[in-house]
Image (cartoon, grey):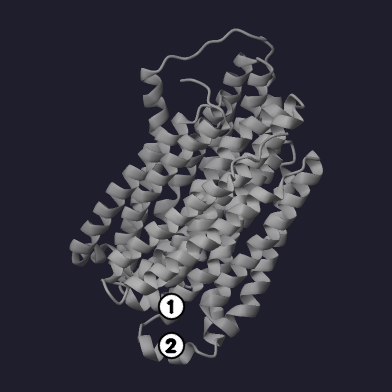
Amino acid sequence: MKKQGFIKGSLILMISAVIAKGLGALFKIPLTNMLGGVGMGFFSCAYSLFLPVYALSVTGLSAAVARLTSQSIALEMYDNARKIRKTALKLFASVGFFGMIFIASAAKPFAVYIAKSPDAQTAIMLIAPSVLFGCITAVERGYYEGLCNMYPTAFSQLAESIVKTAAGLLLCALAVQHSDTLITFFPEGTDIKAVTASAGILGVTLSSVGSALFFPIMRIFIKNDNKCGDKTLISSHDISAELIKIALPVGVSSLVTNFTSVIDLATIISCCEMYSGYSDLSAQLGHENFPQFIYGSFTGIAVTIFNIIPSVTNMLGKGILPSVTYAWEKKDKCKLQKNTSQALLAALIIAVPAAVGIGILAKPLLLMLFPLQTDEISICVKALQYLMPGMVFLCVSFPVFSMLQATGNSSVPLKIMLIGALVKLIGNLTLIKHMGIDGAALSTTLCYTVIIIFSLSVYLKLTRIKLKAKPFLSVIYSGILCGVSAMLCMNILSPIISDIPALFASIAVGGGIYLLSLWLLNVQKNDRC
């Protein structure tokens, strides 16, 4: 397995992420159609407790292990790099175990008192083991990422997505088919949607097991590369301390990021009844558990679409970390500037047309993806449009945070994320009662606007590098052309042909104009020192 540079490594990860997200869509879209708004509320409730614990326990691990491994490789301490992996596995398997116990223990009080959905308890308990297996997987991925080898991470992501899609949909379908039998194993009065949501959650847990098993199976077929070099070994105690020093701020930062889902859970259900249009909307749609329906629709549809592109550009953060670490350790300012510019530009090139396209074509896109959920879509269209600027800022923030971690400033993202979470909380409490669910979407965009402004300013100040503005402005200009052409195409074709062919034609025209504009503006000529 050969070492890859930033561009190749990031491309490998992004391709795997695109495939994984495609498989994820095959999982989430049929699941949403099976569960509906209320069922997705139970599903999202389980994730709302799981994600913060998972973020705190797991998210910082890959970055910490990757940074220390890359640092050892730069100093040709190959034996120490292998020791880092073994030490990290022992340390964070314990962390994952306690995270699993915490989620299982907190399932009932969280479901009853915070989510106000007692039936969600089973789903929360079933997702708990994912924390343990996630920790193991994160250490393995971080080790190979530190070696600048992104293939193991890419293939483990694919293994995870395949298992989640296959197992999740199969189990959910079986739960729907045998609902009369399954409901007898639950307390009287349990909502059947909670049972089917639990079946889908079990598929997620099985996927984490599949991802963790990928690495021992991989090593059966691939020989270890026992390079000679500096035989100095750092003590396990010092390695553990350094891993925690790097991983904890990153994990807490990610915890704050995922805490936005808890903020939505705690505020949307309670605040939406204060919205002046709530009564009319409730009477018009006529759903029981209407606050849960609104929350489930927003998280199951709008937030699902919102998270697709950031999950791809997140791979740029993984890809850039070892390259920036190497350049920082070698004090190569030219290479640091080049890698920074490439990472930010790549994130923007991906995010801008996606955000513009999804925003303009929101309604036909959602109707194509969720044809059975017309009531849910009627709630989510404007909310999704309000989320799109925030999606761009979130996409760009991933590589910035990774670069801050690579330069030894792991605590900075935490401080910035705390400010962002405060903006999100104040925004939800203020805007939902005036704008309904659209207020929650707008507050998310305001949150990530603040985050990208602070994080990019701090990074540029710390590294003392300068970026050329022209390539980034060119991408934004190309994105505007993309949106205008897609909108015109949709307006011309929709009266003539059906919505789905018109949608695909509009996407093709907008994408073609965007790529042509990038080529004519010569955007890539930006990374010379």
Q: Is residue 36 left or right of residue 318?
A: left
Residue 274 position within the rendered picture, expressed as x and y whole percent measured from the top left:
56, 86
Instruction: Identify which amino acid the numbered label 2 is placed on.
Output: Leu
CB under 8 Å between discs 1 and 2:
yes
Name of the residue lying farthest toward the top:
228
The residue labelled by disc 1 is: 379
Residue at (44% x, 63% y) in the render? 44
* Mark nearer the N terminus (1 vs 2): 2
Task: Tell me the CA gap for discs 1 and 2.
Answer: 9 Å
Q: Please tell me whether mark 1 sits on a helix, a strand or a loop.
A: helix
For this rendering, which residue is in front, 334 or 481?
Answer: 481
Q: Examine the rendering and report whether any part of residue 442 can be seen.
A: yes
Q: Is residue 144 left or right of residue 293?
A: right
Q: How many numbered marks, from 0 up?
A: 2
Write down the quadrant of residue 480 in the picture.
Answer: bottom right
The residue labelled by disc 2 is: 281
